[in-house]
Amino acid sequence: MENFVSDILFTASIWALPVLIAITMHEAAHGFVANLCGDPTARLLGRVTLNPFAHIDKFGTIVLPILCIISGWALAGTPFVFGYAKPVPVAMSRLNNPRRDMMLVAAAGPGINVLLAIAASALLHTVTWFPEWFGAWWEATLVNGVLLNLVLAVFNMLPIPPLDGGRIVTGLLPYELARRYVRLERYGIFIVVGLLFLLPFIGREIGIELNYLMRLVMIGVHYLLQFVLMMTGQI
């Protein structure tokens, strides 16, 4: 029991920093670009900030990652940690060029996650600078930072409203198609939850692999990871 608790505490410690930085920067980037494009809503609400407390969602930022860690250890596997922050409010009507600028705002979140993954990968070169006890923790934290940011970047680019990819697709479609497509946003979270959790659960019950969404995401992460590692001299 003591080893189990210490393992959970160590795992939590190497995920805490990557989760907080990834979600904080993701949401702050949305607000920052929205402000540049004419909508100061997020800035006026104090959401264009690197203070993680301004972006924390009690369930998505705290409870969900903890549940991921506990469930991973309970199943004797490697924990897959996922989470989200409070969405940054954007008033589309206040943007200088609503359709174009909304795409830029949406792309800013995944874009900053890719940059964070590159930064974390580059910092892996510093692991040997530290004593072994700290170096092991630092390396694990940075590796998690690379993987988490790439997963968030690819996942958020899925073309499902209200994910960032869905908003980019909305901006690219002709007006009539975009108007119909954006109506999916009210059902988008249910679609994501169904594909991410319900479909794989049903698949396990009937003995068929139905975890198609995460398989698709991990294919994207694999190729993006190769690019990041090449960019930072890791391969």
Image (spheres, rainbow, N blue to C red):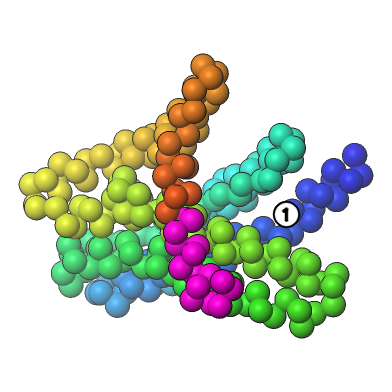
Q: Is residue 17 visible?
A: no
Amino acid type indicated by mark 1: Ala
In the image, is 110 to the left or to the right of 124?
A: left
Magenta stretch, residue numbers: 221-235
Q: Is residue 60 above or below residue 128?
A: above
Frontmost residue, 47 versus 153: 153
Place residue 143 in its image quadrant.
Answer: bottom right
Frontmost residue, 205 versus 223: 223
Q: What percent of the width, then of the height, locates residue 135?
A: 78, 72
- Quarter of the N terminus within the rendering: top right
Q: Residue at x 32, y 61 (%)?
A: 106
Q: Residue at x 19, y 66 (%)?
A: 100
Q: What percent of the width, then of the height, locates residue 150?
A: 49, 60
Give the overall secondary structure of the magenta segment: helix
- Please tell me whether residue 166 belongs to the stretch shown in magenta: no
Check disc 1 and report the residue beneath it: 12
Q: What percent of the width, then of the height, locates residue 47?
A: 45, 67
- Please tell me whether residue 229 belongs to the stretch shown in magenta: yes
Q: Is residue 219 above or below residue 77?
A: below
Q: Is residue 185 visible?
A: yes
Frontmost residue, 141 versus 171: 141
In the image, is 114 to the left or to the right of 141?
A: left
Residue lying at the far front of the rendered structure? 235
Q: Is residue 182 above or below residue 27?
A: above
- Quarter of the C terminus within the rendering: bottom right
Q: Residue at x 74, y 37 (%)?
A: 76
Name the secondary structure under disc 1.
helix
Residue lying at the far right of the rendered structure? 2
Label 1 packing within 10 angstroms: few (<14), some (14-19), many (20+): some
